[in-house]
Image (cartoon, rainbow, N blue to C red):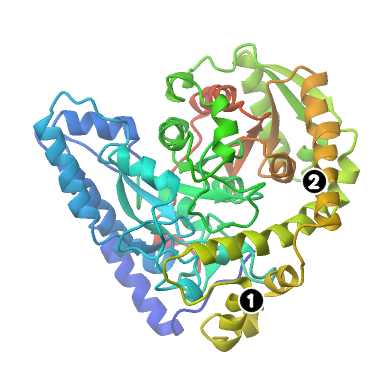
């Protein structure tokens, strides 16, 4: 677990928490028109209905979130920056609805969204990956996914915090920490939020925003979704554009939604999926995008007839009887909803997968190449290469906490010399491991998906570019945990059917406790 960061003296922190309790007691419940409408925990569908019934405006919605951010964020650190143009964008959405009361409008029209701070926005917001090294840099254009969000009429509320450089600066830095954002806090436990899309999950979980975008290279959507009791979709690599995203590995990087419900995540995914000429991988992956979008797969009977694989080694909870019993009950729920569980499966190469170093070897090389290319494409920037970033960190060691956390991952990446035998060998090995492991398991047993606890399956999904969906699965002593459904490339429609059906059968998500009850 990450230890709490010290933001002030004990006395000042005590006074600050007292103020937060007072503020939280006057957070708006948002009553509009003749009927009462509560914004907290409202889904995208709920909000759109409220817009139509004149119970709510986009401006009122944004104002609600801004007040919550002001009240909760000083401790939770889920939001890095608020967009100064958010209210203006909300006003535009409200005006558009008045001008065209019958629409049609997209599901995200007028809906506020936070994007992770490694996703470029060509506006007054910074894009820094949480580092002071990129503060003041100017991006050439919106990221591909942001272009799609704007076209859909979404309100860009701001930037979510993250593990700095998507946790690829230091192996010693705690999850959810960045120099610019400080230490993000799990709103259920007060400690580790997991990362690197920590702020996206924290903010959605605490109703500081409706929906958010995260990115994943290996576990960075699935893990924080599990830890913060929210839904996360890690899409097939290339299904969503990575253009304009501060990279780690173009081979594994993917952009996906982090939301409170599967339905909200489906609406976000269908908005951001598709071809972007600035990301060639989207052209090949476009064959996976279904006509009519992803919301059509929100079926309560989505588990009926689905073959789900259970690899028992991932369910090894030791002597934790509560977790064992909980997942036993979940397996019963899956069966009761019509799924066929293919249990006690084994992956032939599970031991080799556990110890193989190909992923870390490849990512070191890919990170240097991809980051250098990203930095060179910026209109203006204090740094233009990985070497520049390392030098900046040394020069500003106090600001970047180099003495505490170091930058070992960056230093290792800087030593690499580009594409060659080492990279090619690692890539071939991962392809072999994926085909002989996960793909063989899926095809041999004719599975629609594999079910696994927490984010235990994330590395297997990561190295092959496969999709996964995380859904809240329960709480142990107040700490949330999730259940993950993973499938072959392009299987998002099936995964959404499965995840939605499970979610509707269990409805386990609950909001975090009042902030004053947490120990920091």
The image quarter containing residue 153 is top left
Point 32% across, 60% down: residue? 69
Q: Position of residue 234 (x, y in %)?
A: 58, 40
Residue situated in front as seen by the camera: 172 or 134: 134
At x 25%, y 40%, the residue is: 110
Q: Earlier in the sequence, mark 1 or mark 2?
A: 2
- The percent coordinates of residue 200 (x first, y second) are 46, 52
Q: What residue lies at 81% left-to-right and 26% top-to-bottom? A: 441
Mark 1 falls on what kind of element? Answer: helix
Q: Regarding mark 2 in the picture, which secondary structure is present there?
A: loop
Residue shown at 75% from the left, 71% from the top = 412
From this view, report whether residue 37 is shown above or below residue 479. above
User: Which of these two is toward me, 461 or 36?
Assistant: 461
Q: Is residue 475 above or below residue 66?
A: above
The residue identified by callout 2 is 319
**Relative to 11, is 447 on the left or the right?**
right
Disc sitting over residue 387 in the figure: 1
Mark 2 Cα shell of 10 Å, populated few (<14), some (14-19), many (≥20): few
- Where in the figure is residue 373, as x and y percent of width and height? 58, 61
Closest to the observer, 470 or 129: 129
């Amino acid at each position: 677990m990450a230890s709490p960061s010290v933001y002030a003296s004990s006395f000042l922190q005590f006074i600050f928490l007292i103020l937060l309790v007072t503020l939280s007691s006057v957070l708006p419940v948002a009553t509009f028109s003749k009927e009462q409408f509560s914004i907290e925990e409202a889904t995208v569908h709920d909000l759109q209905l409220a817009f139509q019934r004149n119970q709510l405006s986009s401006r009122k919605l944004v104002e609600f979130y801004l007040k919550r951010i002001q009240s909760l964020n000083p401790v939770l650190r889920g939001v890095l920056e608020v967009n100064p143009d958010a209210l203006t964008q909300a006003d535009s959405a409200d005006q558009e609805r008045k001008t065209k009361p019958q629409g049609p409008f997209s599901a995200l029209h007028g809906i506020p969204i936070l994007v992770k701070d490694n996703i470029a926005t060509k506006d007054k917001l910074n894009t820094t990956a949480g580092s002071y090294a990129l503060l003041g840099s100017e991006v050439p254009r919106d990221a591909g996914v942001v272009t799609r969000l704007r076209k859909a009429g979404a309100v860009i509320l701001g930037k979510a915090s993250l593990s700095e450089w998507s946790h690829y600066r230091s192996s010693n830095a705690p999850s959810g920490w960045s120099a610019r954002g400080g230490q993000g806090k799990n709103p259920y436990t007060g400690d580790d939020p997991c990362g690197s899309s920590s702020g996206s999950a924290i903010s959605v979980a605490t109703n500081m925003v409706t929906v958010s975008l995260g990115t994943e290279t290996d576990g960075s959507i699935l893990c924080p979704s599990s830890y913060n009791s929210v839904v996360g979709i890690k899409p097939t690599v290339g299904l969503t554009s990575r253009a304009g995203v501060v990279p780690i590995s173009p081979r594994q990087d993917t952009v996906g939604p982090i939301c409170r419900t599967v339905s909200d995540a489906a609406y976000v995914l269908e908005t951001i999926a598709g071809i972007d000429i600035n990301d060639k991988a989207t052209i090949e992956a476009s064959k996976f995008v279904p006509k009519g979008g992803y919301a059509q797969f929100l079926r309560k009977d989505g588990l009926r007839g689905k073959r789900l694989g259970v690899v028992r080694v991932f369910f090894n909870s030791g002597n934790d009887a509560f977790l064992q019993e909980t997942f036993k009950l979940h397996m019963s729920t899956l069966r009761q909803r019509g799924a066929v569980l293919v249990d006690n499966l084994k992956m032939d190469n599970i031991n080799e997968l556990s110890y193989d170093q190909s992923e870390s070897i490849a990512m070191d090389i890919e990170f240097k190449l991809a980051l250098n290319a990203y930095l060179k494409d910026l209109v203006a920037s204090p740094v233009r290469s990985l070497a520049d970033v390392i030098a900046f960190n040394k020069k500003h060691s106090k600001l970047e906490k180099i003495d505490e956390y170091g930058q070992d991952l960056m230093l290792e990446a800087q030593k690499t010399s580009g594409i060659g035998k080492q990279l090619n060998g690692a890539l071939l090995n991962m392809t072999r491991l994926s085909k002989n492991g996960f793909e063989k398991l899926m095809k041999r047993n004719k599975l629609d998906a594999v079910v696994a606890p927490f984010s235990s399956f994330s590395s297997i999904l990561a190295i092959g570019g496969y999709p996964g969906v995380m859904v809240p699965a329960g709480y142990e002593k107040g700490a949330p945990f999730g259940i993950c459904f993973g499938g072959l490339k392009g299987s998002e429609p099936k995964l959404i059917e499965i995840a939605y059906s499970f979610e509707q059968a269990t409805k386990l998500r609950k909001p975090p406790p009042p902030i004053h009850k947490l120990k920091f």
